[in-house]
Amino acid sequence: MALPESHLKILIALAEGDRHGYAIMQSVRADGGQLGPGALYAALGRLTDAGQIEELDERPAAELDDARRRYYRLTLAGHTALTAELNRLNALLDRARLPGVGWAPA
């Protein structure tokens, strides 16, 4: 089953390392996407409920942190879901490249 685009982008951001919500939004934006706070935190809640990410208890040193921030980490289940989705997308691209489909890379 395909992951929602917002979930995929969040999992990719967290595959690069632990991040707080705003840093996840910045990562998505750097990749050419857009994810507002409402959509972000709804998706984070669903991913946490699914066991694909976890909220961290550890925090940076107080002088480097904002107490309002929540930090997240990709779990093994999240890594598995991300890998499966990337494999699914690669297979779809491979199929799109077949003769007669009408698309080929330049």
Image (cartoon, helix red, strand yellow):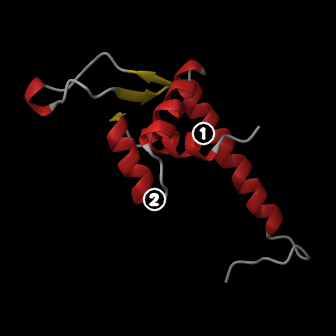
Q: Amino acid at mark 2?
A: Asp
> Which numbered disc, 1 or 2, marks the residue that appears first in the sequence?
2
- Relative image position of residue 59 (x, y in whole percent): 23, 22
Residue type at mark 1?
Answer: Leu
Give the Cα separation between the discs numbered 1 and 2.
Answer: 16 Å
In-front residue for pair 102/65: 65
Q: Residue at x 51, y 25 (%)?
A: 45
| Percent position of residue 35, x then y | 47, 48
Query: Within the image, what quadrant is residue 102 found in?
Result: bottom right
Nearest the camera: 4 or 79? 4
Quick one: quadrant of the N terminus?
Answer: top right
Residue depicted at x 79% and y 76%: 103
Image quarter where the C terminus lies is bottom right
In the displayed orientation, state which residue is furthest to the front.
Answer: 38
| Image x and y of residue 24, in percent | 39, 42
The disc at residue 65 is none
Q: Nearer the viewer, mark 1 or mark 2?
A: 2
| Residue farthest to the top, as pictured | 57
Element class at badge 2: loop
Which residue is labeled 1 in the image? 82
Residue at the location (73% across, 42% down)?
2
Q: Is 12 displayed left or right of 97 in the figure?
A: left
Q: Residues within 10 Å of mark 1 (few under 14, many from 20)?
A: many
Placement of 17 over or under 102, stated as above or below:
above
Question: Residue drawn 41% across and 28% down?
Answer: 73
28 displayed left or right of 7: left
In the rendered image, the residue lying farthest to the right is 100
Which residue position holds label 2? 31
Is disc 2 surrounded by few (<14), some (14 to 19) or many (20+) residues within 10 Å?
few
Secondary structure beneath label 1: helix
Residue 53 location, x and y as percent?
Answer: 49, 26
